[in-house]
Image (cartoon, rainbow, N blue to C red):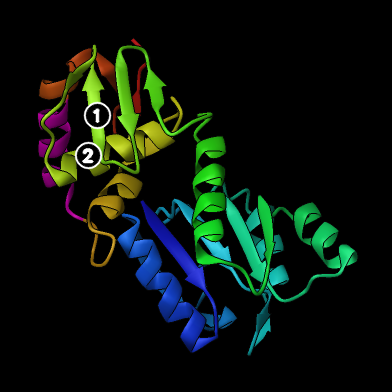
């Protein structure tokens, strides 16, 4: 899963990047509001960690802009603003959670995982889609109780589809998830990975909307 971190504090930002990567995430770290993307669905962020007090602008304005654009990615606010009015304002503006600094990094990771589970309409560490079971943190998947032998990219692809919760996930989003730190892979390469995943989990479990994207079936 690919996380967008917007935090201007060098020490905290570096610590969060390290902790997120150790927890299995990929991270893009930005320090200014000006550098933030206009959209969250392209290049396909799984979630955003957003500081409100940025040196060149307001994180709250970023949050409002994303929600006006109907961005679906969950946003976890991380800020020193602890007043009740600030917390309520952040949640009302569209934040999925609000964590006040200073915080313990294990708590942030736990809250992030909880937000991702809610977004994917899953209630526990195990995500269930019919006979298919996925454990995001353990990087494990089973079909009918039997372990699946997936490559790292196949697992990331399965995870991106699972996070869609049965909705169509655009091709560009999937391509970016498989190459989160570089240019998205081309369509032909993505189709090869989709074909390989279908062979391992069953072709009927991956639906196709031609020219748009794919979704995961609960069968």
Image depth: mark 1 or mark 2 in front? 1
Q: Is residue 164 left or right of residue 146?
A: right
Q: Label 2 belongs to which residue?
A: 155
Instruction: Tell me the quadrant of the picture where the C terminus can be found.
Output: top left
Q: Is residue 40 visible?
A: no
Q: Which mark is residue 141?
A: 1
Residue 152 on the magenta segment: no
Q: Position of residue 25 (x, y in %)?
A: 34, 57
Answer with the quarter of the image where residue 128 lies.
Answer: top left
Q: Position of residue 106 (x, y in %)?
A: 50, 59
Which SS class for mark 2? helix
Relative to 103, residue 115 above or below: above
Question: Badges 1 and 2: C-beta atoms under 8 Å apart?
Answer: yes
Q: Nearer the viewer, residue 70 or 21?
A: 21
Q: Which residue: 38% across, 19% down?
A: 129
Q: Earlier in the sequence, mark 1 or mark 2?
A: 1
Q: Nearer the viewer, residue 28 or 105?
A: 105
Q: Which residue: 36% across, 12% down?
A: 130
Q: Which residues are magenta?
A: 185-197
Q: Which mark is residue 105?
A: none
Answer with the quarter of the image where residue 57 lies.
Answer: bottom right
Q: CA distance from mark 1 to mark 2?
A: 8 Å
Q: Is residue 76 visible?
A: yes
Q: Which residue: 24% across, 29% down?
A: 141
């Amino acid at each position: 899963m690919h996380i967008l971190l917007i935090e201007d504090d060098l020490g905290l930002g570096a610590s969060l990047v390290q902790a997120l990567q150790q927890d299995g995430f990929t991270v893009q770290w930005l320090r200014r509001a000006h550098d933030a993307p206009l959209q969250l669905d392209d290049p396909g962020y799984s979630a955003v960690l957003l500081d409100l007090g940025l040196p060149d602008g307001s994180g709250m304005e970023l949050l409002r802009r994303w929600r006006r654009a109907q961005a679906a990615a969950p946003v976890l606010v991380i800020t020193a603003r602890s007043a009740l009015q600030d917390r309520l304002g952040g949640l009302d503006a569209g934040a999925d959670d609000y964590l006040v600094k200073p915080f313990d990094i294990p708590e942030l990771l736990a809250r992030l995982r909880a937000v991702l589970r809610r977004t994917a309409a899953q209630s526990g560490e195990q995500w269930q889609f019919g006979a298919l079971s996925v454990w995001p943190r353990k990087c494990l998947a089973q079909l009918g109780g039997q372990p699946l032998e997936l490559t790292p990219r196949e697992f990331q692809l399965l995870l991106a589809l699972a996070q869609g919760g049965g909705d169509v996930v655009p091709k560009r989003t999937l391509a970016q998830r498989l190459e989160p730190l570089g240019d998205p892979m081309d369509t032909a390469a993505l189709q090869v990975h989709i074909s390989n995943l279908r062979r391992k989990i069953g072709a009927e479990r991956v639906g196709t909307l031609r020219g748009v994207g794919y979704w995961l079936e609960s069968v």
